[in-house]
Image: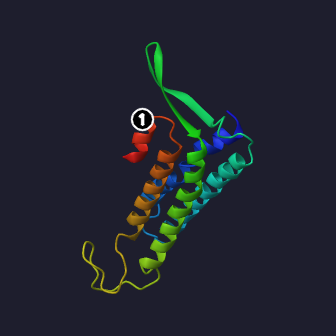
Amino acid sequence: MNASALTVWLIPVPPLLSAAVILLFTFRSRWLSHTVALTAIGISLVLGWSVVFGALGTPHFADHPLASSIDWLPTGNTALRMGVAVDPLTVVMLFFVPLACALIILYSVGYSNFGKALDAHDAVGSPPHNGVEPMYTRFFAFLSLFSGAMLLLVVADNLLLLFFGWE
């Protein structure tokens, strides 16, 4: 497995890990939850764009797309494989999907009025009185999970892995 293939495998990992980190460790810190989500999608953005610019610099990339797979589930004489593939369509999607996810997360920080004080009358499950979202950290965990799943869907090389990203 070369460095480019390893980079493609790593693209969906930071947002998926950040979703778990936010749910398990940062549920009390609103600032830390959106910072972890933004950092993770930023790492995926850098990894994705490095693959994009590497592919654009490769002559005849469309004739020889990048693909890497591993045996996932042996089934007798054959095995179900899971892998990643980068073709020209994937290159375009790797340029736009992490960028769009990063912008969505950044917009969500401002839209959910981060920095406003909690009102004494705010309750979980009801609209906040002064614009503060009570499920702030869970929202950013779900945004990170969505971003990781979307990136997994983009780099998947078979329908099984694409289905995991879709669901």
The N terminus lies in which quarter of the figure? top right
In the image, residue 137 sits, relative to residue 157, either above or below, namely: below
Q: Residue at x 34, y 74 (%)?
A: 134
Label 1's element?
helix
Q: How many marks?
A: 1
Name the image quarter holding residue 4. Answer: top right
Name the image quarter holding residue 162. Answer: top left
Residue 142 seen in the current view: yes
In the image, residue 112 sits, relative to residue 167, either above or below, namely: below
Q: Residue at x 41, y 67 (%)?
A: 137
Q: Residue at x 27, y 78 (%)?
A: 127
Q: How is the image coloured?
A: rainbow
Name the image quarter holding residue 126. Answer: bottom left
The residue at which mark 1 appears reads as 160
In the image, residue 62 sits, relative to residue 140, either above or below, namely: above
Q: Position of residue 115 (x, y in %)?
A: 47, 82
| Camera-side residue of 159 and 17 | 159
- Residue lying farthest to the left in this orientation: 126
Q: Position of residue 138 (x, y in %)?
A: 38, 64
User: Is 59 on the left or on the right of 129, as rendered?
Assistant: right
Q: Amino acid at mark 1?
A: Leu
Q: Residues within 10 Å of mark 1 (few under 14, many from 20)?
A: some
Q: Position of residue 97 (x, y in %)?
A: 53, 57
| Camera-side residue of 137 and 4 | 4
In the image, residue 127 sits, relative to residue 82, either above or below, namely: below
Residue 34 seen in the current view: no
Q: Position of residue 10 (x, y in %)?
A: 59, 46
Q: Residue at x 51, y 71 (%)?
A: 106
| Camera-side residue of 78 and 39 | 78
